[in-house]
Amino acid sequence: MTLRWRPTALGRRSGWLVSALFACTLALFPPGVIQRADLLLFDTLEPWFRAPALPTESTVIAIDEATLAAMGRWPWNRAVHAELIDRLTAVGVSSIAMAILFPESAPGDAELAEAMQASGRVILAVAPHAGTATEGMFELLPVDTLRASAAALGHVDVEIDLDGLSRRTYRLAGSGQPRWDALAVAALRHPGSGEPSGLNARARAGLQQVVQRPLWVRQGELLLPFPDTRGRPEVVSYYTLLSRPEQVRRLEGRTVFIGATASGIDAGLATPSAAHGGNMPAVEFHARAFEALRSGLTYNSAAAGLALALCLTVISLAALLRPQAGTRGKLLLGGLLLVPPLLSGAVLGAFQLWIPPASAMAGLLLGAALWFLSVLRHTQGSLAQARHDADATLRSIADAVLTIDEDARVVLLNPVAERLTGATLDSARGTPVGELIRDFTDQSAVVVETILACLKHRQAIRLPEPIAWQAVSGKHHALRLTATPVGGEGEGAVLVFHDVTETLAITARLQHEATHDVLTGLPNRALLLDRLHQALANAQRRGSLVALLFVDLDRFKRINDSLGHYVGDQVLQVVAERLTASVRSGDTVARWGGDEFIILMDHLRDRSAVVAVAGKLLDLLEREVETQGESGLVLSCSIGISVGPADSSDAETLLSMADKAMYRGKLEGGSRYTFYSPEMNTWSRDRLNLEAALRKGLGNDEFELFYQPQIDIRSGRLAGLESLIRWHRPGSGLVRPDLFIAAAEESGLITNIGEWVLNAATHQAARWSADGLAPVPIAVNVSVRQCTDMSVVDTIRHALRDSGMDPRQLKIEVTESTAMHDPERVAELLHRVHALGVGVAVDDFGTGYSSLSLLKRFPISELKIDKSFVIDLAEDNDDAAIVRGTIALAHSLGMRVVAEGVETELQLRFLARHGCNVAQGFLFAQPLPTAEIRHWLKMPPPHAQRAIEGLQHARAGAPGTNGDG
């Protein structure tokens, strides 16, 4: 009988767990050997998985050895470049990217600038330049004369990888901040436009000069394909184009890159293909980057998290497959070793995303080695368990503990101390404690002095202030040291380093929260007011300006109501980030409360900077916002601006002015910025007076309902009445609703006014019925605010109950825009109204953006065509077509059609011919008070009857037609 050995479950799992941790560590903190391996794998895999490229459209005009031999020593008079640019422009090349630096003035600059200006498609190079140790990196820009004539500027910065080869550049780069497009990006973005944009435009305007900054910043990695023959641009000698002008014609429509290839003036770049053909000229590198961008073949390096996921995936797969000992298990592990590069290659080809596989492969190799050694761990299980128990005991001590002898040399340190120092017990034993800790804290001298005092005086000493400590991992700690002597004279001591980092962080956080908003991290009101007072004082002293931008998100309440406050909070955080990114580093962005933010801009010379920032804010906030679980949210904002001390030197007054300006802009439609002006105070007072008068009017019964008749087109009978509110405002006479409804909506009074209208209309209908007058349906308009509150259903129910009115004689009218405001909520509300037996009509149909699928979900019995389409029926074919289509649509959905604004018999005939059911307008009557409408309830007046009779005669006299058209 053959016995087959199988490793224990612990052996199988622990080996792969260790390899997973090892691979994850390599993925998160890749050493040089892993990085070099990943670069080699990229060069190997990319050509195999590369997607097809577009035919090349770029040409390198090379300043080669032949050109130098013919034209003489470099550099030449820049008029030579001007001549070439003129020829290229004449044949219509797309863009001209010059990979040549012009940092200093030289002969021929004027001719070159004139040629560039005439061309409007020349892109010049910007390069990083290392200054002195104090200067850092700065930008090497073209001279002013040439920069002003360039269509754009593009940086020629190229990254050199760990293996010394160049594979990538960056979409944006610059000194201090990434302001310049890459030369290839600029060539692709500005083909023949001649107009700079973005940051290059600001450089043209003189706002960006050569500024020395400490860092060269890059953004937007562009990892390029392996430089094989695919994607290689055409190369033409510079001298050939000058000496043989006919050769220029074949460059029509192409993008050209001009640069040096001669070895004497261009050292070239070492690329992955250098082993086969030497260094690549820099101009060819940028041309290849251009072709890669055109074909969508630039790659991005994946975040460490994806490399981590790849490691965990393949190692988890190996652990789940449980390879057995023997040849089969070895083959399986060998096959698994190919999975990481193949997965990386597939993702590279499909998504242009490079996930480095070397760490996963190293993890698999380690896992395989550990798996083969699991038998040894199995035989040593008892020892491993003992070590595990001992290690758990040591690790249970949360503080770093070191034991020293009488000479202050290390005797013992626990795992926490090992992590802080990066040293093992074996390597640290016998080391002077000062030497052990000096690389991790600048206070090592204080620590050693405390230890020596403890050993000398044989008493416990605790340092009053924490020690600043940087662990091997780079993490910063705050440690409180206690040194306690052990035993008697001549013996050592125990050092305990207690980590108080979190305690100090909590204290700092509490201090921060006192002056900052918890949700967004922005300064709160208290800190903003403090900075505003200081800014105003400085502005008055220096003669400068201070601007306050009061930013209020438009219709933000809809996000909270429909998506929840959790999504609303995420949106506010995104808004805070965008606001902060849009202003200068010295400006203050504060959260005022709710969906309101305030930006404080200081040290201003005029208002132009404020206008630029306000426009930028509107653009940023109108971009889509993505939150967890939601995408495609689009915001807008209203911005009120006040400027001090021009508007006021008082902080509170300046804030009030910005608030008023914002409010005025919101009333004018929102999504705009508005500067404060003195008349806003008068306007605000008038608005407040109007709201106060409305409240008083409700209490003093100053409102009255007028009624406009609706006539059945076929029979000529009264088909219904629309109730329309009027206000007898003392001192102003009869006020139409369009002059006060907006104020009622904003102040919330519309709910009380709407309730009054419902009660007044239903009770009036009941009184007419009691007087023996024939009942007709009465339509009552419902506002947007009423539709957001389900309590309007109870209001209708109580009005019907109290008046005794037949529910079938009441119609509720909502405008099309109101119905589309919150379709889900409005649909539920209208169904509840319909359940009461009350009819539902859509008013002003055609003026909104309703969806037919949503209209079908509403219990609508009537569509009202807006009068704007009825007025020009006879002259405007578009209006006529809309009216015909609306009638046909409504009838197909089983709805009755009412046309508003009917003023002429010609309009009435058109509506009758196309099957409109009911007409309403001045042809029959204006809105009438209750006393006059009683006559209509008895019998329509003669002029209305004549209009219908004339219509009927017209029908009878039209051969071959019937009443419906």
Image (cartoon, rainbow, N blue to C red):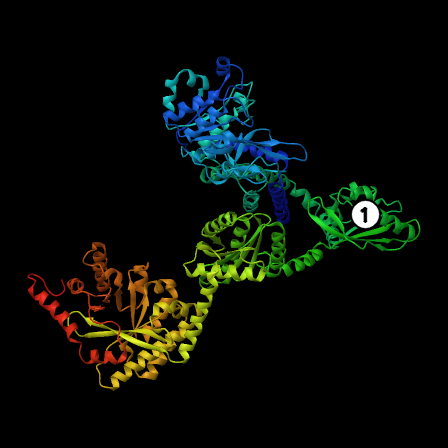
Going 22% across and 83% down the picture, which residue do you hit? 773
The image shows residue 378 at horizontal and vertical percentages of 67, 46
Left-right relation of 534 to 619: right
Q: Quadrant of residue 462?
A: bottom right
The image shows residue 358 at horizontal and vertical percentages of 57, 37
630 over 147 or under it: above or below: below
299 over 502 or under it: above or below: above
Q: Is residue 109 visible?
A: yes
Q: Residue furthest top?
A: 69
Q: Is residue 595 visible?
A: no
The image shows residue 868 at horizontal and vertical percentages of 26, 61
Q: Which residue is mark 1?
A: 412
Going 36% across and 22% down the picture, which residue do you hit? 249
User: Looking at numbered disc 1 in the image, what kind of residue is underneath it?
Assistant: Leu
Crowding around mark 1 (Cα neighbors within 10 Å: few <14, some 14 to 19, many 20+) is some
Between 336 and 90, the one lying in front of the other is: 90
The image shows residue 783 at horizontal and vertical percentages of 36, 69
Q: Helix, strand, or loop for circle 1?
A: strand
Between 385 and 251, the one lying in front of the other is: 251
